Image: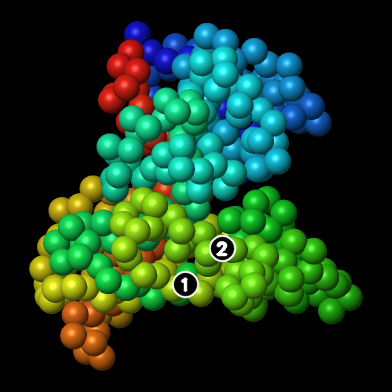
Amino acid sequence: MGYNVVVVGATGNVGREMLNILAERQFPVDKIAALASRRSLGTEVSFGDKTLTTEDLDTFDFTGWDMALFAIGSDATKKYAPVAAKAGCVVIDNSSLYRYDPDVPLIVPEVNPQAVHGYAKKNIIANPNCSTAQMVVALKPLHDRATIKRVVVSTYQSVSGAGKEGMDELWDQTKAVYNPTAEVPPKKFQKQIAFNVIPHIDVFMEDGSTKEEWKMVAETKKIVDPAIKLTATCVRVPVFVGHSEAINIEFEEFLDEDEARDILREAPGIMVVDKREAGGYITPVECVGDFATYISRIRQDATIDNGLNLWCVSDNLRKGAALNAVQIAELLGREVLKKG
C-alpha cells in the first residue's frame, strides 16, 4: 500500500525535479497529481515512464491525499498550504514561508530526522534554503564529535537558485558577449551575471547582510544547534546548476583533519573526494544530477586553535530543494504515516 502524493508547482524547475526523484527513488505511490497555476494548466510533465497532465491548483480538492510537495513561491504557498493541511494532507513546503515558524519543523533528514514528529501542530513541514541544506549535512557529524563554536561560510551559488529566469538570463547574456550587436541588460539579477559574480542574493537587511545570509544563520541554528555562531557571505556566480561553499569551522575541541575526513566518509548523504593533487576535488559541473553532498579540500586552519576548512558542493535543485523534500516525504511515511 502506497501514498497519494501531490506535487504543487509541477511545471517549475524544482517541481519537475521532485517528480523525477520520486520516480528514481521508487517512492511508494498509489496516486499522484501534478498541480500548476491556470496559466500552465494542461502542461504535460514526466513521472518515470508516465506522462501527467497538470491540474488546476485553484480548484483541487486535497481531501484523501496523504502529502503534498509544494514548489511554489511564498505568496502562493500562504494561500494554498493551509487549505491542503486543513484537508488532512501533510504539506512539505520548499518556500521560505514556514521555515522560521516555531510550530513548523525545519528538516534535513540526515541531520534532524526526529523533528518530523512536530509536523502535527500545523500539518506542515518546511524544507530549508538550498545553501543551508548542503552545509548542515556536512556540519552535523563534525558537530557531534567536537562541538562547533563558529562557522564562516562563503557561498558560490548557481543561477538555477533564482529559477528558470535566472538560467535564461545567464544563457542570453553569455551569448550576447560574443555578439557585438546584442545587448541583454540585467533583469533577474542586479548586475550582469555572465562572466561576473554578484555578492547579493535576496534583499539587503538593516545590518548590511542580505536575507540569504540571514537565512543561513537562522536555519543552521534551528536545524543543528542554536548555540552555533555563523556568518555568511552569499555570492551568485555564472554557473547553471550546483552550489559551492567554502566553510571555515571553529570547534570547542581539537579535530584532526584525518579524523574529520573519516567522520565525513561515514556520514549519510556525503561523498568525500579529497585528493591533494590537480583535479582531486569536486566542482559544481561534476555534481549535477547526483544526490550526494560532496566534500573536498579538508584541512586544518592553523590561524585558530581548533579550526578546519572544507569545500562543499551539491546540486542545489536536488539536495537543496527537490531531493530533500522527497527525503522528508520518505521519513514522514516511514516514521509517522507508515503506509508504504
Residue 273 placement (x, y as % from top left): 25, 65
Q: Residues within 10 Å of mark 2 (few under 14, many from 20)?
A: many
Which quadrant holds residue 247? bottom left
Q: Is residue 327 visible?
A: yes
Q: Residue at x 73, y 16 (%)?
A: 59
> Taking 253 as reference, is 162 above or below it?
above
Q: Is residue 157 above or below residue 24?
A: below
- Whether residues under marks 1 and 2 lie with C-beta atoms below 8 angstroms apart, the answer is yes
Q: Write the residue at 19% across / 80% down.
A: 306
Looking at this view, name the residue that lies furthest to the right: 181
Choose top left, top right, bottom left or bottom right for residue 323: top left
- On the image, the x and y values in percent for residue 110 come to 28, 45
Question: Element type at marker 2?
Answer: helix
Residue 282 as seen in the image, left or right of residue 55: left
The residue tagged 1 is 232
Ranked by sequence position, the earlier of labels 1 and 2 is 2
Q: Which residue is mark 2?
A: 212
Q: Residue furthest bottom?
A: 303
x, y percentage for residue 191?
A: 74, 74
Residue 188 quadrant = bottom right
